[in-house]
Amino acid sequence: MKKIQIILLIIFMSVSGIMAQSGKKSHWLKPSNFRKRVTTVVSEKSRYYYSLDTYKASIINVQGPGKLRVLTRGRFLPDEGDKIKYRIRYSIDGGEEETIKISGVERSKKATYYKGSLGVPGQLKDFTIELGRGDHNIEFVIDDNSVNVAARYIFIPGKKKKHKWIAYSPMLPSDPVDLISRERIYHYYRFSKEKPLKIEINGPTELRLLSRIENHYQMKGRIQYRLQVKENGVVINTYQLSSRPSQVTEYKNNKELIPGKACEFVINVPKGRYTYEIIPLDKSKNSVLGRLLFPKKDVELKD
């Protein structure tokens, strides 16, 4: 009997370990908008890359924390020289642009294009972007179109920092709204383009925002919305978010609306006192609900 119990325990721990690992698996991502696909064959296996453009940004949507690895290949045309170079620009959540310079790229000896119709792929060149907690959109463009470049994207999830989060109230005036989720009441605040969400907070700390778009019952499917973040009056980020009507959350006192599933981002607050404004940018969308949280360990910084 004892042997059977030990065997069952080992099996249970093994299955639990596999399930835990599967939740943290790396996964390939596709651009959410511009998807001109380039099929590249490596070791007799097809790999799908996506063309980069000078004007149309390739947008990758992902939830952090983790690392986004970008694998790129330039294309050698028949009259191309021995080496090529190119530059890729990217921005995270509408923030400042970063530039990746890639040079000295030679023709690949291991890769070909499907049916050999496009020329010769260049050597694989990659770079990695670190992403913090929350929903992120990363935009990629090629600096100029003198070299054709395509990219693949793989995301490696990371561990979230273990914080005890506590609620934080915005500046007055505010429009409080109570939501019920799994028999618990959560306090949110309604805000709009005309009445943005305003917060004053001391740093250094993290300010976590959970946002929910407000849906009418006739609204179906996925809804895109944008939130702009201003720090002391200066725009620092713009988040492109996507949500569906929630199936587990409802309004406490309003049966005509359905809250969207929560989207999340985190603002890293520098040392000192700062004022933040969260502003919806889409005039055609409804108002948004926001819930603010910050780490309990930083409670002494609140006042």
Image (cartoon, rainbow, N blue to C red):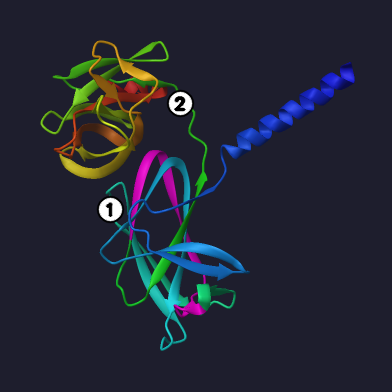
At 57% across and 37% down in the image, what residue appears? 23
- CB atoms of marks 2 and 1 within 8 Å: no
- Chief SS of the magenta region: strand
Judge whether 246 appears above or below 25 on screen. above
Q: Where residue 45 appears, x then y in whole percent?
A: 60, 65
Q: Number of labelled discs? A: 2
The residue located at (52%, 37%) in the rendering is: 159
Segment tinted magenta in the rendering = 116-140
Query: Residue 205: image x %, image y %?
Result: 35, 31
Q: Is residue 115 left or right of residue 226?
A: right
Q: Please tell me in which quadrant of the rendered image residue 272 appears.
A: top left
Disc on res. 163: 2
Secondary structure state at the residue bearing disc 1: loop
**Disc 2 element:** loop
Q: Residue at x 18, y 22 (%)?
A: 171
Residue 268 appears in the rendering: no
The N terminus lies in quadrant: top right
Q: Which residue is mark 1?
A: 96
